[in-house]
Image (cartoon, helix red, strand yellow):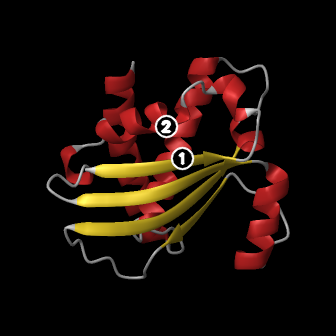
């Protein structure tokens, strides 16, 4: 089971996402069985932020002085799935998800789900530095996304 602690430091999220915690709980419940971690207590923290704040974090932790859609901070380099584990933190920028501003709520949520899945896989130590790793991560992202979208719609 995945426990997700959701925090928001950007008011604009509330205009597009009424109950953030329930939304992300539903997303996690719609994951394929492999990523539900049945019989285990897996937890993570999600911060819903904005370009200004994510830029600061990107500068401090990655030495990149620019905003980005998502940052992921795995709790460890090698995850040992024990009964209880904290896998890390994800930060998502509203400004990136809300482009274009004219997009429908459905498209906004789909983009958010896809971005969240990407960050979630980073917490599980997937990366996309090498092309073969990128293809492996992309395949998993698509698998999870299809599972989630089919159950959310």
The secondary structure type at the circle numbered 2 is helix
Is residue 67 in sight in this rendering? Answer: no
Along the viewing direction, whichever of 89 and 7 lies nearer the viewer? 7
The image shows residue 28, relative to residue 150, as above or below, that is below
Dot 1 surroundings within 10 Å: few (below 14), some, or many (20 or more)?
A: some
Q: Position of residue 69 (x, y in %)?
A: 69, 51
Dot 2 surroundings within 10 Å: few (below 14), some, or many (20 or more)?
A: some
- The numbered mark at residue 38 is none
**Which residue position is annotated with label 2?**
21
Residues under numbered marks 1 and 2 in contact, where contact means CB atoms less than 8 Å apart: yes
Along the viewing direction, whichever of 32 and 37 lies nearer the viewer? 37
152 with respect to 94 (left or right): left
Instruction: Name the residue at 66% across, 17% down.
Output: 104
The secondary structure type at the circle numbered 1 is strand
Where residue 65 sits, quadrant-wise, is bottom right
**Which residue position is annotated with label 1?**
6
Along the viewing direction, whichever of 42 and 94 lies nearer the viewer? 42
Q: Position of residue 1 (x, y in %)?
A: 25, 50
Q: Earlier in the sequence, mark 1 or mark 2?
A: 1
Instruction: Name the residue at 49% across, 53% down.
Output: 118
Q: Position of residue 10 (x, y in %)?
A: 76, 42
């Amino acid at each position: 089971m995945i426990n997700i602690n959701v925090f928001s430091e950007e008011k604009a999220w509330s205009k597009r996402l009424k109950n953030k915690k329930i939304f992300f709980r539903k997303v996690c419940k719609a994951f394929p069985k492999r990523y539900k971690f049945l019989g285990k207590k897996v937890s993570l923290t999600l911060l819903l932020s904005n370009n200004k704040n994510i830029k600061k974090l990107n500068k401090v932790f990655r030495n990149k002085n620019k905003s980005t859609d998502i940052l992921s901070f795995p709790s460890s380099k090698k995850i040992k799935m024990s009964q209880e584990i904290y896998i890390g933190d994800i930060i998502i920028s509203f400004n990136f998800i809300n482009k274009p501003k004219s997009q429908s709520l459905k498209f906004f949520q789909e983009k958010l789900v896809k971005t969240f899945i990407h960050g979630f896989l980073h917490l599980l130590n997937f990366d996309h530095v090498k092309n073969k790793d990128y293809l492996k991560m992309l395949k998993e992202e698509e698998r999870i996304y299809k599972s989630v979208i089919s159950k959310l719609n």
